[in-house]
Amino acid sequence: MFRKAYLSAALVAGFAFAACAARPAPAPDTPSEPEAPKAVHSYILLDRTGSMSNLWDEALTSVNAYAAAVGEVGEGETATLETSVTLAVFDAQDGLQYDVLRESIEPADWKSVTSDEVAPRGMTPLFDAIGRIISTAESDNPEKAVIVIMTDGLENSSREITREGARAALDRVEAKGWEVVFLGADFGKFDDAEAVGVSAAQTMAVGKGTMEESMNRLAAKSRSYGSGAAPSVEFDAEDRAVANEAEVKDRDN
């Protein structure tokens, strides 16, 4: 009797051991890979035509302010956001003159642009310049980009790209999920912006004396878009009040 009981116990133990051996051991906890830092690249296209002369120093100050502010961590930001800025200026003198003054510069490395480096001149080949800044951005092909166009006048001298060509270029930008904003430098007419497909929410007249603060606010919006906190870059009523947009538009209409 004892022998039978012993054999039965041994068989039960054997089956239990086999069941345990067949069941895979739990996988050890593996640390998840750190999330890649998010990034946004800003492309600023600045009109340097002759009519910008009385705004030039303020325009450059505002661009320098943007380059600094886009590198500043916003309230509530937790994830790392990499930022860089490209600045190009344009005018027309026997054709488009397009010069990249700063290329993919991180805010910490930004050297302020001054009127000693570049000065207003020439006419306004706006469509040509839009096509060129988009080509610059497409060559870099960042995941997220904000293209800022600042001008104080309407198109008057493009030779390379038609209005339709500029619109097609901006359609490519939209397909990539990039953002385009159009700033009127103390200028309130947006016929060209509307013609190439820039939405009213992304155009704003910026009055003299308000450019630096407006660009600081735009830099914060660019960071929010880059980090994913905001789906797009758009101007709200407070932005427009800060920029004195209504006053500029009333004067220009």
Image (cartoon, helix red, strand yellow):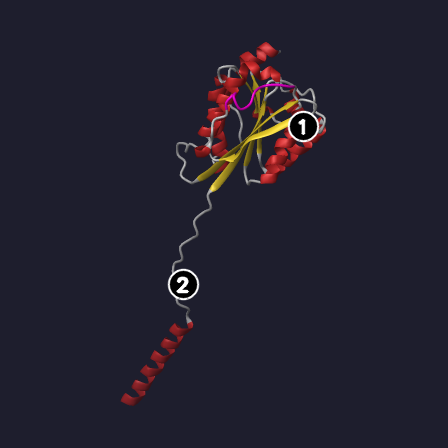
Q: Position of residue 230 (x, y in %)?
A: 49, 34
**Tag 2 residue:** 27
- Numbered range of the magenta stretch: 114-122
Whether residue 1 is visible, yes or no, is no
Secondary structure at badge 1 equals helix
Residue 170 quadrant? top right
* Circle 2: element type: loop
Q: Position of residue 3 (x, y in %)?
A: 29, 89
Q: Nearer the viewer, mark 1 or mark 2?
A: 1
Question: What residue appears at the point 61 percent right and 31 percent down from the top-left corner?
Answer: 133
Dominant secondary structure of the magenta stretch?
Answer: loop
Badge number at residue 128: 1
Q: Earlier in the sequence, mark 1 or mark 2?
A: 2
Can you tell which quarter of the image residue 178 is in?
top right
Given residues 233 and 210, the one toward you in this image is 210
The three-letter amino acid code for the residue at tag 1 is Asp
Quadrant in the picture for the N terminus:
bottom left
- Left or right: 111 as drawn, with respect to 47: left
